[in-house]
Image (cartoon, rainbow, N blue to C red):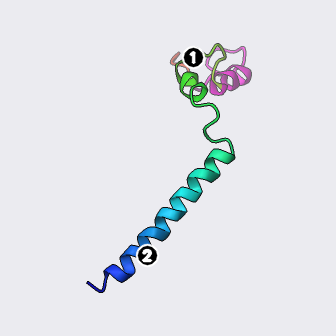
Amino acid sequence: MNILYLLIPLGLVLLGLAVAAFFWAVRSGQFDDLETPAMSVVMDDDTKPAAENRRKKTQGSEPGSDPYSDDD
């Protein structure tokens, strides 16, 4: 029974911190745009990944100069 004297105030403090964190997130704009980040996952990206662009820039004109090719 004595543990309740510790747990109830501790629970109220944690509840207060959670409510404060929620209101901070609302005021700082964390919930302004909920749809665009979710849509960016399914949007088609026309640019090539940076690794492919780097590979093409470092690739020489000689056959076999590409370390990633299977020309062996």
Residue 14 point in image, percent of width and height: 47, 66
- With respect to residue 62, does 6 lie above or below? below
Residue 62 part of the magenta-drawn span = yes
Amino acid of disc 1: Met
Residue 33: mark in rendering: none
Is residue 48 depicted above or below 50 in this figure? above
Q: Which residues are magenta?
A: 50-67
Q: Earlier in the sequence, mark 1 or mark 2?
A: 2
Q: Residue at x 58, y 14 (%)?
A: 44
* Number of marks in the rendered image: 2
Taking depth in this image into account, of 70 and 5 the one nearest to the observer is 5
Q: CA distance from mark 1 to mark 2?
A: 48 Å
Q: Residue at x 74, y 22 (%)?
A: 57
Measuring from the top left, give residue 58's x and y in whole percent. Answer: 72, 25
Q: Position of residue 6 (x, y in %)?
A: 38, 81
Q: Where does the image place residue 2, in percent across and percent down from the top left?
A: 30, 86
Tag 1 residue: 43
- Please state which of residues 59 and 24 is positioned toward the viewer in this rendering: 24
Q: Is residue 10 magenta?
A: no
Label 2, secondary structure: give it: helix
Give the crowd class for mark 2: few <14, some 14-19, many >=20 residues within 10 Å: few
Front-lying residue, 34 or 19: 19
Which quarter of the picture shows residue 20? bottom right
- Residue drawn at the location 47% of the way across and 63% of the way down: 15
Which kind of residue does numbered mark 2 sit on?
Answer: Pro
Q: Quadrant of the N terminus?
A: bottom left
Q: What residue sits right under mark 2 in the picture?
A: 9
**Furthest-bottom residue in this view:** 2
